Image (cartoon, rainbow, N blue to C red):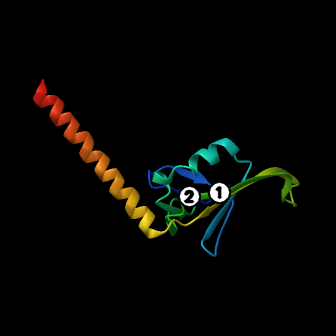
Amino acid sequence: MEKDKLIFTDGTNLEYDTISVSQGRLCIAFNSGNFTELETKFSNAAVLEKIYQADPQGNKTAVHKNYSILKEITKRKNIVTDEINDVVEDVIVVCMEQEPEWVVSQRKQDDRISSVEETAEILTMDALA
């Protein structure tokens, strides 16, 4: 059975099991997820600008903007995730906080400045060559 998925700003996606939003916190649970891969994914603010929730067919059902501050990642071992079929899995829960709008704006401005600096450096080197 296919699961709902998250679609990140960079177009990558990731299946998840449950999701909740409360008091500026977004918590996502992954049954049998890879702790290191999830920690890496949710530490990259650039791909977390918009996180879309989508059904198994890829239809977007919700969007979560600027939840890019990794607050907590926990792993609970040997949790019964399906009592009917006696499925026991490790459950990883990732909790994110929403960045203030001014922080997002500052990051975008910093990226633009870096881009302009790189272009100026390339043009200067080309002119000197």
Q: Is residue 127 above or below residue 15?
A: above
**Residue 114 shows in this picture:** yes
| Residues marked 2 and 1 touching at CB (< 8 Å) | yes
Task: Quote the CA–CA distance across marks 2 and 1.
Answer: 7 Å
Which quadrant is home to the N terminus?
A: bottom right
Instruction: Please tell me whether mark 2 sits on a helix, a strand or a loop.
Output: strand
Point 58% across, 52% down: residue: 42
**CA neighbours of label 2 inside 10 A, class few (<14), some (14 to 19), many (20+):** many
Lower sequence index among marks 2 and 1 = 2
In this figure, which residue is indicated by the disc labeled 2?
6
Residue 5: % across, % down: 58, 57
Looking at numbered disc 1 in the image, what kind of residue is underneath it?
Tyr
Point 16% across, 34% down: residue: 124
Residue 53: % across, % down: 55, 64
Point 57% across, 59% down: residue: 69
Residue 95: % across, % down: 66, 61
Of 91 and 106, which appears nearest the observer? 106
* Residue 16 marker: 1
